[in-house]
Image: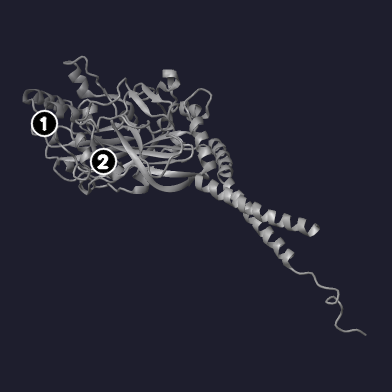
Amino acid sequence: MGKMLKSCCIYGTGLLSILVLIAGIAMVLDHVFLNALNSRIKTEVVLENGTEAFAVWQDPPAPVYMQFYFFNLTNPEEVLKGERPAVAEVGPYTYREYRPMDSVTFMDNGTKVAAVNPKTYVFEPNMSRGLEDDIIRTVNIPAMVVMERFKDHSFISRIISDLMTDGGMGLFMTRPVGELLWGYEDPLLKELRLVDPLLDDYFGLFYKMNGTNDGEYVFFTGKQNYQDFARVDLWKGQSSLSWWSSDECNMINGTNGASFHPVITKTERLYMFSSDLCRSLYATFDSEVRVSGIPAYRFVPPSEVFANITVNPDNAGFCVGGNCLGSGLLNVSVCKEGAPIIMSSPHFYQADENYVQDVFGMRPKKEDHQTAIDINPLTGLVVRAAKRLQINVFVEKLPVFRQTENVRTLVFPVMYLNESVLIDPDSARKLGALLAEASVVINIPFIVISLGIILGVVFMALLCCLRTPESTAAERQPLLTS
């Protein structure tokens, strides 16, 4: 009876090990716990009062820094004679950027939320290589705007040219960094304001952009579909743009680049709308990285996003006035009040080589000049990001303006920015703890499989003991007796 009970226990252990193994393998194949975890994350990452996702979206805890680098022109006289410009990069001039969401209003039963995103910049001298009163020589952008606007009006252009000559204004100017960024009273615009009182005689690359917002956004909250989390529905009351010549180029796609939906895969495109660029763009998976101990996927905009129409015909809608630029450049004059502003990556990274060769001092480098976003794929939280853009001006010889003399036709680099963020230690600790819990949940099937294997080993050991025959009394007698 005891032997039979022992056998039942042993074979029961074997049967249990098989059942546990089958259950564990089934859970792995069906992604039971992974799907359950993803479902929970999808329902919790919603823009809703009281959620962690809403708190981070409304007032990001991680510090954001904006760095400005200027290109100081070193050979202005030679450039006017037709030689290649030589520039020296100076900076960074670093500012702490504060960007909380304001005027937050929930709409449509909590499925959408309206908000504005004012940005305030505070200079950080300890993080800068220079001061705001550093003098920079660069192209006279207000003069270039005026000359471009009136180049086909000979009478007006002669008057403007005389005004510039009398005022000692030329194609290039020297100004402090602070004025170039935040604004100054321009002498040419001041003169023209006498004719047009509505003209603003102040100019700055970021004039009226400190302490202000770029318009009201309406975002999806992700309540109905997790992939809609923080996606832009309307900007300035419109669901599409009107600057470009194709419906596709005028689409407002994706988020504002600060937030992304949870459960991100390597195969998807992450769409973003950038009011700085006056367009939407996308990023694709590049590599796996770790940031402050947090696993992340790095997404970067591929070269096709800013490629010329030969490489990417979909970009034909971004050609302005039928004039299509080469790869790596975007003419944004249509959304900058006609100013001949051209955007690119810093140092013309990923642009056609001729733009790099046109200006001495351009040294494009992926590590320093590529835009990249590192995102934790489970939560969609941005753990590190660097948005890098360069502001350029289209310069050409205009016969009606003697100030342009014999200058080459080229895209002149003025400055570039690096807007960066790195997850703060407290947020990294919280996210790390969450991911540790998630890891345990995800690995439950493998723990079950391990338990099944252990039970199998125990079963085999017990089975070997059961099948080993017991020795007889005669066999237990010693071979030699005294």
Spatial separation of the CA atoms under disc 1 and disc 2: 32 Å
- Identify residue for label 1: 401
SS under mark 2: helix
| Colouring of the image | one colour
Mark 2 is surrounded, within 10 Å at the Cα level, by few (under 14), some (14 to 19) or many (20 or more) other residues, namely: many
* Residue at the farthest front position: 1
Asked if residue 225 shows in the view, the reply is yes
Q: Quadrant of residue 65?
A: top left
Q: Quadrant of the N terminus?
A: bottom right
Assess whether mark 2 and mark 1 are in contact (beta carbons under 8 angstroms).
Answer: no
Q: Which residue is mark 2?
A: 306
Residue 104 visible from this viewpoint: no
> Looking at numbered disc 1 in the image, what kind of residue is underneath it?
Phe
The answer to whether residue 93 is left or right of residue 84 is: right
Is 197 left or right of 43, judged from the image as shown? Answer: left
**Mark before the other along the chain sequence, 1 or 2:** 2
